[in-house]
Amino acid sequence: MRVYGCILAWGILVLTLGCSSDDKPSGGANPFGTAGSGGTAGSGGTAGAGGSNTGGSVGDAGPDQGPAGQGGISGDAQPDSPVDAEADNAAQDVTLDIVVPVDPCDAPRSAVVGDQLYAGGPTPTDFATAFNAEMNALTVPGPFMVVFDGLDSTQEADWVLKIGTPQGDPPSFDGTPASAPFRLGEKHSIYAQADASFAMRFGTVDIPVVQFSFGGQFDDKCAVFSAEEFSFLIPSSAANIVFHGSTLDDLLGPPTASFDGGKYNAWFVSLSGQMKAVQVP
């Protein structure tokens, strides 16, 4: 009986000693990464400072209670919230529709010539004076002609213009005109810009053009086009052309514009005024 009593007492002692050890890890060590106050990652010690995602120890102040932060995601690696992600996508979405009012004309086509456009603004003064004098001396439609097609349409694919050198009266294009798209907007407003090769004709003198841009508005009948600005690039290769008694080089001075990958190889000329309608074959 004494023997059994000793064995029982010894077993109770071993059991007591075994139960007195703490099952929780000491010092806040966490095999999952960061632990935080109340279990949120980063409050008791951020993942970057206290340990990496591979099981580094948390900050000394990290308490044991609360669930461990799974994986310990660092602040820099935080993904966007759904709201942020949606905002980012919207800012980069270039396919968002932009509603632009379009006022088409009754007629599908209108042809206009530029004999009431005058040089000014940034155009070199000597050239502007010569250009305007030659413009007033014109006896046939010119010095260039624009034919707009698709004016009665609201479809962008239908808006195409032709621009080139006119001949005769009523005028027709001398040679093949340049072709380019244009934009039709509210109150018959039109904008176009393109590289184009044609010439402005003053009698026997043709002044080459390599690029044009313009913006303006047709009247209610789409017969008269008022150009706020109709600008051209004249290539410097035309420097020796004689115009109004002087060379273009003398009238325009050093080239200040560039085109076709070159540098300072063109002159910029700006016109404004009205372009009147003409009948074309």
Image (cartoon, rainbow, N blue to C red):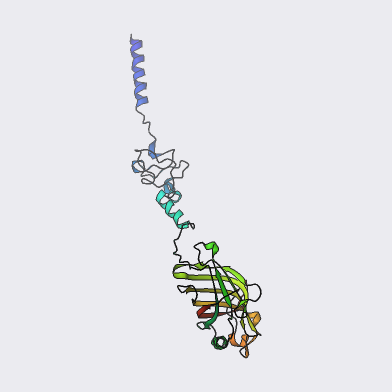
Task: Please give the count of numbered marks on the rendered protein.
Answer: 0
- Residue 15 visible (yes or no): yes
Image height of 157 relative to 110, above or below: above
Image height of 250 relative to 174, above or below: below
Q: Is residue 116 left or right of residue 14?
A: right
Q: Quadrant of the N terminus?
A: top left
- Residue 81 visible (yes or no): no
- In the image shown, does 233 or 89 lie closer to the viewer? 233
Residue 40, quarter of picture: top left
**Residue at 34%, 23% in the rendered image:** 16
Q: Percent position (x, y) of residue 264?
A: 60, 78
Q: Percent position (x, y) of residue 55?
A: 46, 40
**Residue at 56%, 85% in the rendered image:** 135
Q: Is residue 116 left or right of residue 166?
A: left
Most extreme residue toward the top is 1
- In the image shown, does 47 or 92 lie closer to the viewer? 92
Image height of 69 relative to 268, above or below: above
Most extreme residue toward the bottom is 245
- In the image shown, does 207 or 247 lie closer to the viewer? 207
- In the image shown, does 13 or 240 lie closer to the viewer? 240
Q: Quadrant of the C terminus?
A: bottom right
Q: Percent position (x, y) of residue 115?
A: 55, 82
